[in-house]
Image (cartoon, coloured by chain):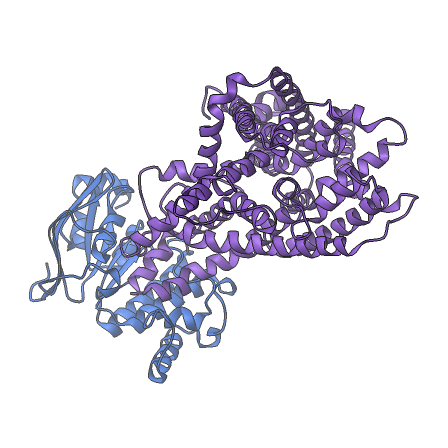
Amino acid sequence: MIAGDEDILNLKQTCFRQGKFALTANFEVSKGARIAIIGPSGGGKSTLLHGISGFLKPTTGQVLWEGEPMSDHPGERPLSILFQDHNLFPHLCVADNIAVGINPNMRLSEEQILLAKNALDQVGLSEKAADFPRDLSGGQRGRVGLARILLRKRPLILLDEPFSALGPALKDEMLELLSQILDLTEASALMVTHDTNDAIRFGDQAILVAEGLAHEPQEIQSLFSNPPPALKEYIGDRA
Amino acid sequence: MAGSVIAISLRLIFGGAVITALLTFSFGTAAVVALRGHGFGPLLPTDLSAIRFTLWQALVSAFLSVSVAIPVARALSRQSFFGRRALITLLGAPFILPVLVGVLGLLSVFGRSGWISELLLFFGLGRLSIYGASGVILAHVFFNLPLATRFILQGWSGVPAERFRLTDSLGANSWSRFLLIEWPMLRGVLPGAFVLIFLLCLTSFTVALAVGGGPKGTTIELAIYQAFRFEFNLGKAASLATIQFGLCGIVALLAFLVPLPKVGDIGLDRLAHQFGARKHRRLDIIWISGAAGFLILPLSAILFRGLGGILSLPGQVFSASITSLLIALISTGVCIFLALGLSLSIAYSRLNTQKIVEGISVLGLSTSPLVVGTGLFLMIFPFVNPASLAIPVTAFVNAMMAMPFALRVLIPAVRDIYNEYLHLRLSLNMGRGIWLMRIVFPRLRRPVGFSAGLVAALSMGDFGVIALFASPDLQTLPLILYRLMGSYQMDQAAAVSVVLVAQSLFLFWIFDRGGRGHTES
């Protein structure tokens, strides 16, 4: 924990079940934190994100936002999500794909249209507003997703390996852009990643998720310099 | 090296021969019909009304099937309930259900003396009548609603899970969910489903023969049959057949422009999403039980009426079932041999297999059995009495008509094996014989078994060309069934139906089971 910060997200003795798999989580996330979620496949990383975003209801415990229980409807939770794939609707142009971020019916007020244009500007895609996802490169699609996040201005951002299909240079570029957006919106972010370098570059903290347990967020440098057995096994000799 | 050159040219010859046979079968018979020396007979106003009716009923049937399938598929894609998997499997049944059996079942429920009429009578209301246009459309919806439902269900299961989550997390309401997910999915699936069902209804003969007829219920196919069988007016049959072929050709061209839905089972039985599952549960239950009832009631009516009468069926049913079995086995053998040969011979080629499969499918669907029958009749008739060749001709026609279905399964299966293992074969320097016997054939066992089952069941229940060729002393199960229905011996007809369905399902099961083998790989 970084002292002095207020907690915004609180998973209080929660347990999430998906079929036979169960994940326990009990931790807080402080305002403005950038947390990498790491751990082996099947350990529960995605389950954790689904639980926070509301696709999974906890079987025990509570997910609190600023001390209050969060809505059951994912759409009413104060957060935005970016997946690895399928972040864009293939039948909508770039402008509409961003517009769904503030109104899923895509009817925007003039002021909102301006905001959407601005967001597109910020990610450097103002020329592409009328293009369709199929005409964009992987990096450009990632930018559209980030523009939507920027526009939505939610205080919590969840990222499920969003850039893992991109090449190293492009990935760096996206992480940089993400970091700018987080600075701009002052949002907290949780990002699932398999790449320890990405984790270190992105986060100041890390949550280790392994064998159905989400550990408390820890200072990322100290976690890697002194890894617990589960992390050691996961990263091997590369730490 | 010389050996492989010979092998390649053998492959080319074989593949070319099969494709030529397919083309001759569909275009050649039509050409014979069109080019026959005696010329075309003039068309009467009744023939023009048959053309109008054919187009109209196909439009209405396709429209009804597809538009009812949308809410049914939506309900099935999000509601979980006991028997869901069984119901989805059952949706595939009308495809191999002999048409006459389906019609008999519908008559038992919706006909003049069917269950619903009895119920209406009990409440002092009149009887239903489904002969004519309403019967044709009812039967077409019965056969095609399940098909359309499966296509749309396939569309639902093709939507990535992330897209549902994303839409949810954006706080979408029902309308924006429709805009963001359902509408784009339907836009991809519906045109193909509609054209496919339209084509099937355009070339459907048995339904029109069984419940159609009269000035407001005669399709072109039926008119060809009548011109042929009752008036023996070959000129008129030829004119009608040419028109039918032209219509099918136009629709087939149309079908090329839209992507046809894939036939597959993958992922159909998992829940695609749970959007509004709780909120719309009641409405969904109404749609699901309505569709299930519409499907299951006629089938159970047959079972209910026919099961008791099986043992008292006359001995001719037994010999007819042997004849039907024989026809089914011959056409399965011919069909699988040719289809497998074609699939293997184009496996190495650079041809776009996707396009070939689509082309053959469209060709097969737009081939009218009555046009083919008329053409074959005209070809054979100068030399021998066509009735004496009824069995081989029927077996051959069934094989050719079922070929597109077999090819749709086999061509991709063979192509996959070659794509996956060909480099391995070359690097191991594996000989051709071992390659085929140890790698290709064992891996093809399952798709071959499945498609053989499909062909056998289709051939067993088919009642198309045989109606043109049959002499009164020829007995097959569909022929006996048709004659019993024609003389309103519905209980005996139901008993024959049970035998026919049992035999078709048994054949399908044997082949499919044989394909699965005892090892899963």
The answer to whether B445 is drawn above or below residue B342 in the figure is above
Pick the front one: A145 or B304: B304
Q: Quadrant of residue B182?
A: bottom left
Can residue B207 be seen here? The reply is yes
- Horizontally, residue A84 falls left or right of residue B370, namely left
Where's residue B405, x and y in %? Answer: 61, 37
Q: Residue at x 33, y 69 (%)?
A: A101
Where's residue B341, x and y in %? Answer: 69, 29
The answer to whether A95 is drawn above or below residue B139 in the figure is below
- Horizontally, residue A233 falls left or right of residue B156, namely left
Pick the front one: B481 or B54: B481
Q: Residue at x 84, y 26 (%)?
A: B385
The answer to whether B342 is drawn above or below residue A87 in the figure is above
Where's residue A102, x and y in %? Answer: 32, 72
- Horizontally, residue A106 falls left or right of residue B91, namely left
Q: Spot the blue chain and give its letter.
A: A
Pick the front one: B340 or B227: B227
Q: How many marks?
A: 0
Quadrant of the rendering where the N terminus of chain A is positioned? bottom left
Q: Residue furthest right?
A: B37
Q: Spot the purple chain and give its letter.
A: B
Q: Residue furthest front?
A: B124
Where's residue B493, x and y in %? Answer: 56, 28
Can residue B267 be seen here? The reply is no
